[in-house]
Image (cartoon, grey):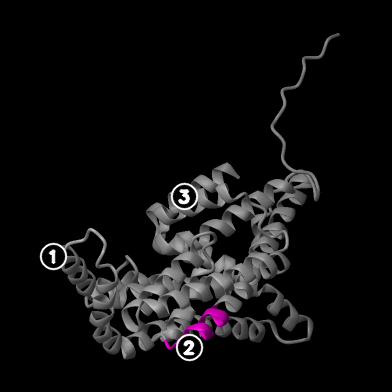
Amino acid sequence: MAAVAVALVFGMTQLSVVIIPIVLALIIASAMFPLVDFLRRHHVPSAVATWVSLLAVLGVFGAVVWVIVLRVESQFGDLAASAVDGADQVRRLAGNLPISDQQFQDAKASVLDFLSSKQFGTGALAGVSAAGSFATSAAVFAVVLFFFLKDGPRIWAFLCRPFTGHRLERAQRVGDQAVTTLGGYVRGTATVALVDAIGIGAGLLIIGVPLAIPLAVIVFIAAFVPLVGATAAGILAALVAVVSNGPVAALWVVAVVVLVNQLEGNFLQPVVMGRTLKLHPLVILIALTAGTILGGIVGAILSVPLAATAWGIVTIWNGPDKPAEFARQKRPEHS
C-alpha cells in the first residue's frame, strides 16, 4: 500500500493529465456501480447499461460547466457595474478604520482588474492547465470511465491473477473495500452537497443576489472539499452580495450559509455519510493540503476519498474485521 501511494503521488506530479482523470474515473465508476449493476440484474444489456450510466455522468458534468461558465458570462456585466457602488458602500461603512483613501482605491482597482481579467472568466473551466490539456484530460476521463463501468470487475480480476490462496482473498477484499468506500463517499457527499446547494441557492434567490444559480452550483462542488469547502463557498457568496446588494444583504447571506451548514453538519451528514469517512480532522487537513499542492482544486477533491479508501483497506488487510499489523520478528527456535 505504501508503494502504491508513492506511485500515485509521483504519477500525479509527473503525469497529472493522465493520472488525475484515471483516479477521477475510478471514483465516479465506484459511485455509479450500483446503477450499472441494477440495470444488468433487470436484464438490460451490459453495453446499454454502461452507456446510460456514462451519458448520465457526462450530462451532469456538462450541466455544471454550462451553468457556471455561460450563466456567469451572461450576468457578469451587471455584476461588474454594481461592484463599484457596493465598494463605495463598504468604504463609507469602514470610514472609522485606519485605512487611507489611496489604499482603499488601490485595493478596489486590483479587485476590479482581477474581475475583468481573462483568467477570472476562464479559470473555472481551464484551471491552471492549458485548454489542450483540459481537453486531453476530459477525453481520457470519458474513455477510462466507459471501460471501468463496462469491465471494472473483469479488470480487477485480471489484476488479481498473480495472487493465490490468502493473497487472492486479500486482493479481492481490497477491491471490494475500495469500491464500497469510494462509492459510498461520493454518493453521500453528493447528497449532502445537493441539500447545501438547494438551501443556500434558495436563500440567495430570496435575498436577490445575482448569480444565485451559479453560486449554488459552486456550493455543490465546494462541498466535496471537507472542512474548508463550505466556508470558501460561503465567503464567495457573501462577497458577491457585498458588491451587488450591499453589506446588509451580505450579512443575511452569511446567516443563511451558517444555518444550512449547521443543519447539514449536525443532522444530515451523520445520517447520510454514516461511517464511510472514518478519518480524524487532522488527517483530512493534511490530505487536503497535500492534494491541493499536487493537483490543485481537483487534487483537493480527490485527496480525502483516496485517504479514506487507504484507511479502509488497512482495516480489512488481514480479514473482514482484522486490520493490518506491524510485522513481528519471529523468536529463534531452541532445540
**Which numbered disc, 1 or 2, marks the residue that appears first in the sequence?**
1
Q: Do residues under tags 1 and 2 come within 8 Å of each other at their CB atoms?
A: no
Dot 3: element: helix
For the stretch drawn in magenta, the main secondary structure is helix
- Looking at the image, is mark 2 or mark 3 nearer the viewer? 2
If the image is split into quadrants, where does the N terminus sit? top right
Q: CA distance from mark 1 to mark 2?
A: 35 Å
Residue 249 appears anywhere in the view: yes
- In the image, residue 179 lies at what x, y percent? 67, 63
**Which numbered disc, 3 or 1, marks the residue that appears first in the sequence?**
3
Q: Do residues under tags 2 and 3 come within 8 Å of each other at their CB atoms?
A: no
- Name which quarter of the figure residue 53 lies in: bottom right
Circle 3 packing at 10 Å, graded few (<14), some (14-19), many (20+), is: some
Q: Is residue 205 magenta?
A: yes
Q: Name the residue that disc number 2 marks.
A: 205
- Name which quarter of the figure residue 113 lies in: bottom left
- In the image, residue 300 lies at what x, y percent? 47, 59
Task: Tell me: residue 157, above or below residue 238.
Answer: above
Q: CA distance from mark 2 to mark 3?
A: 42 Å
Residue at image position (75%, 47%) is 164
Q: Residue furthest top?
A: 335
Tell which of 249 and 42 is nearer to you. 249
Task: Tell me: residue 7, above or below residue 219.
Answer: above
* Circle count: 3
**Which numbered disc, 2 or 3, marks the residue that appears first in the sequence?**
3
Residue at image position (41%, 80%) is 249
- Name which quarter of the figure residue 119 lies in: bottom left
Q: CA distance from mark 3 to mark 1?
A: 46 Å
Q: Is residue 275 magenta?
A: no
Q: Name the residue that disc number 3 marks.
A: 9
